[in-house]
Image (spheres, rainbow, N blue to C red):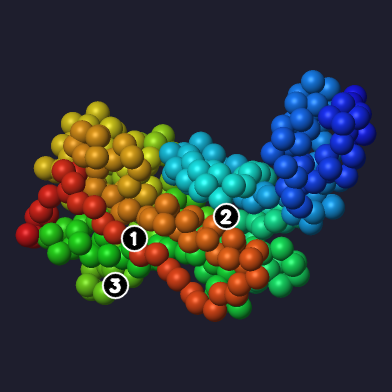
Amino acid sequence: MATMLEVAKRAGVSKATVSRVLSGNGYVSQETKDRVFEAIAESGYRPNLLARNLATSSTQTLGLVVTNTLYHGVYFSELLSHAARMTEDRGRQLILADGKHSADEERAAIQYLLDLRCDAIIIYPRFLSVEEMDEIVEQHQQPIMVLNRRLRRHASHCVWSDHKASSQAAVEKLIALGHRDIAFITGSLDSPTGVERLSGYRSALAQHDIALRDELIVEGKWTPETGARGVETLLARDASFSSLVASNDDMAIGAIRQLHLRGIRVPQQVSVIGFDDIALAPYTVPSLSSVKIPVTAMIQETINRLIFMLDGGEFNVQQTFPGELCLRESVTAGPRA
C-alpha cells in the first residue's frame, strides 16, 4: 500500500505539504494541490482517516442513532433522507448507528459513534429514558441533540413534537364533526410516541365528557398489517364506531383497505385519520386525512443547533414543533353533525 511519503516523492513536495493538502489546513498553491492529487491517484494512496481525525480534532461527521424497528416505515425513510441531505449541505458525512432493541443497545450505539469521534450526535430514542438522555448530554463534550423527545434538564438539546396535543386535536376535530364513537389503533406501547398519542385520544374524550370504551382501543405495531388486524379485532368485538384514528399513516392505510374488504365505505360509514402525513397520503383512495409532523423542520433545527454548538455557540431556548391536521377525503361529518 502506498504511503504519504511515496506520494510526496512522486509529487516532488514534502510530506508536510501532502498533509496540508489532505487536511485543508494552511496555504498550498493550486498547482501544488493538483500535483499532490495526481500523485495520490497514480499511487492509489488512501489516507489514514483515524490518524487524520486525531490530528485535526474533527471528522466532519454527524452521527445518528435510530433503533431498527423504525427502519421499515415511510416515516423513517423521510427522516433519514432529510438528515442525509442536510448533513451533506453542511459539507459533512452522516453516520448511522443501530439502537437495536433496548436502552443498553441504544447506549452502545451512542458510544460507538463517540468512539468514531463523530463531531456531534443526534439521538432518535425509543428505549432510553429522559433521565438517561439528560445524563448522556451532561457526560460528553461532543454536542448531542435528542430528536422527538422532551428533555427536562437540557431543553435546548432537544427538538420535539407534542404528540399528545396533536392527537387530542385530531380527535376533537372528529368530535366537532359529530363523531362520538371513535375507535383508536395505537402504536407500539413500548414507544413514547405511541403512548403519547393514546394519551391524547383519552384526553379528548374526557374533555368532551365522552365515555372511554376499552373495546374501541386496539394495539398496533406501526405496520399496515397491524392496522388491518386492528379493524378485524374491532369488528370481531362487534364494536360500533363511526370514525377511526390510527397512530400512523401505515396503519391507517391498512385499516382503510380492511374496511373496504369488509364492505364498509370510507368515509361514508367510517371516517379515518392517520399520523405523519407521509407522501402517499394525498394519493390513497380516498385521500388520507393525517396529522402532519414537521420532520423536515425538526431535523433542520437539530442540525443547525449542532453546527452552532460546534462553532462555540450556546442555545438557551426550547422549541416544540406542533402537528397540523390535514383534512382530506377520508373524513366526513358524523352521525351527530
For label 1, the residue is 323
The residue where tag 3 is placed is: 206
- Name the mark nearer the viewer: 3 or 2: 2
Q: Which residue is mark 2?
A: 124
Q: Earlier in the sequence, mark 3 or mark 2?
A: 2
Q: Residue at x 59, y 61 (%)?
A: 307
Counting from the top left corner in percent of width and height, residue 158 is at 54, 67
Up/down of 202 relative to 332, above or below: below
Residue 305 % position (x, y): 55, 64
Task: Tell which of 174 and 71 is nearer to you.
Answer: 71
Q: Upstream in the sequence, badge 3 or badge 1?
A: 3
Q: Which type of secondary structure does the marked residue at label 1 adopt?
A: loop
Number of other residues with Cα within 10 Å of mark 3, as a class: few under 14, some 14 to 19, many 20 or more: few
Q: Are marks 2 and 1 in contact (CB under 8 Å)?
A: no
Percent position (x, y) of residue 90?
Answer: 56, 50
Q: Is residue 221 above or below residue 321?
A: above
Tags 3 and 2 in contact by the CB under 8 Å rule? no
Residue 105 seen in this snapshot:
no
Q: Which mark is residue 216?
A: none
The answer to which image quadrant residue 146 occupies is bottom right
In this view, the residue farthest toward the top is 42
Q: Amino acid at mark 3?
A: Ala
Determine crowd level at label 2: few under 14, some 14-19, many 20+ residues with C-alpha closer than 10 A.
Answer: some
In this rendering, would 266 be left or right of 38?
left
Marks 2/1: CA–CA distance: 18 Å
Q: CA distance from mark 3 to mark 2?
A: 31 Å
> Residue, x 51% and y 36% (percent of image)?
72
At horizontal 64% and vertical 66% (from top left) the residue drawn is 311
Q: Amino acid at mark 2?
A: Tyr
Is residue 77 in sight in this rendering?
yes
The answer to which of 30 and 170 lies nearer the viewer is 30
